Amino acid sequence: MVSLRFPFSFSQPPKLPNPTSTSRRVSSAAFVAASAAASAAAIAAVSLDPKHPFLQKALNRAFSPLWGSLSLADNSSSMVVESKTGVEFPSVLGDSLGLLGIGLRKKSVLGLKNIDVYAFGVYADDNGVKEFLSEKYGKLSDSEFKENKKFNDDLIENDICVTVRLQIVYGRLSIRSVRSAFEESVGSRLQKFGGSDNKELLQRFTSQFKDEYKIPRGSVIDLSREHGHVLCTRIDGKEVGSIQSKLLCRSILDLYIGQDSFDRQAKEGIEHKLASLLQK
Ligand code: DAO
Ligand code: DAO
């Protein structure tokens, strides 16, 4: 990834930018400047108006959809911006979790409109991924390797530390609508992978989320699969519960990187990223 330094600082923990605030203006100026610097063709462009739609478009095109746009954090770790929502994700979480890809969870409401509910980033332990993939695929020829579409399944199935970070974009989430969305999304996966009798497991998961919790726009939820298939949930950095269940971990990860994931482009980008980790 391109590595650049700018004298701007971005506030942490990452709260969503308010489109009218100064920080938003600084952030988008920094992002445009960073994009411009990263794009060899855009050297002259930095002196143009960075808000010019043509320039914005050209700069956005210089980056793959997976990575959105690049901006920079106030430490050595870079930030990756989900382009539709402007939500930022650090490229490294903790000591060793590297960002594999970002995406958007949308929800259709009454078949009338699609709302952006949250942006998500999928992280995995770099060493765990490399070790596992090279053990399993190290002997494949280049073409066999390129045709392999199973990297995401490997990540879902195996005991590798993975965190999915959700950053809430929709400003009017009620706990009731969250619960019913879980029942639909997580519930259908529990049924698909584990058979019909999983009400108790779903209930154990949802009962972690007390009615009094609030998840306004800007809330950060980390769903982490830790060693031994333990799913640990944190809201704004505070642990709210953990459940040991391979089936639950699999069902949650399937939402983001499985067959019928929320964001197909994100899922495909993650597949490529996993392949590139092995080839390094
Ligand atoms: O306001 O009725 C409405 C739309 C609510 C959509 C809720 C989708 C919830 C998705 C789960 C969020 C998990 C953090
Ligand atoms: O998007 O449908 C979905 C499923 C999201 C699962 C996320 C669970 C974490 C939610 C925490 C809610 C706190 C009240």
Image (cartoon, rainbow, N blue to C red):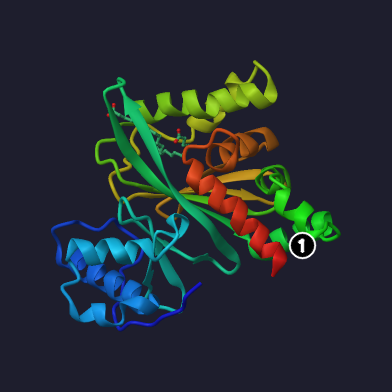
Residue visible at 15% across and 62% down in the picture = 21
Identified at 79% across, 61% down, the residue is 134
- Percent across and percent down for residue 236 are 40, 53
In the rendered image, is residue 230 in sight? yes
**18 or 113: which is nearer to us?**
113
Give the vertical position of 45 relative to 249 (above or below). below
In this view, the residue farthest toward the right is 139
| Most foreground residue, 226 or 138 | 138
Give residue 188's quadrant in the image: top right
- Neighbour class for label 1 at 10 Å: few (<14), some, many (≥20)? few
The image quadrant where one finds ligand 1 is: top left
Can the viewer see residue 74 in this picture?
Answer: no
Judge whether 180 appears above or below 217 on screen: above
> Residue 133, position in %: x, y?
76, 57
Residue 72: image location, x then y, percent = 37, 73
Q: Secondary structure at mark 1?
A: helix
Q: Residue at x 57, y 43 (%)?
A: 257
Task: Tell me: 272 left or right of 1.
Answer: right
Q: Quick check: 119 above or below 69? A: above
Name the residue nearer the viewer: 70 or 41: 41
* Screen quadrant of the C terminus: bottom right
Determine the image quadrant of residue 44.
bottom left
Ligand 2 closer than 8 Å to the CB at disc 1? Answer: no
Q: Nearer the viewer, residue 54 or 181?
A: 54
Q: Amino acid at mark 1?
A: Glu
Look at mark 1 in the image and give the residue it sits on.
131
Number of numbered discs: 1
Residue at 50% in and 28% down: 185
Image-based side of 138 in relation to 197, left or right: right
Pinpoint residue 269: horizontal percent, then vertical percent: 54, 52
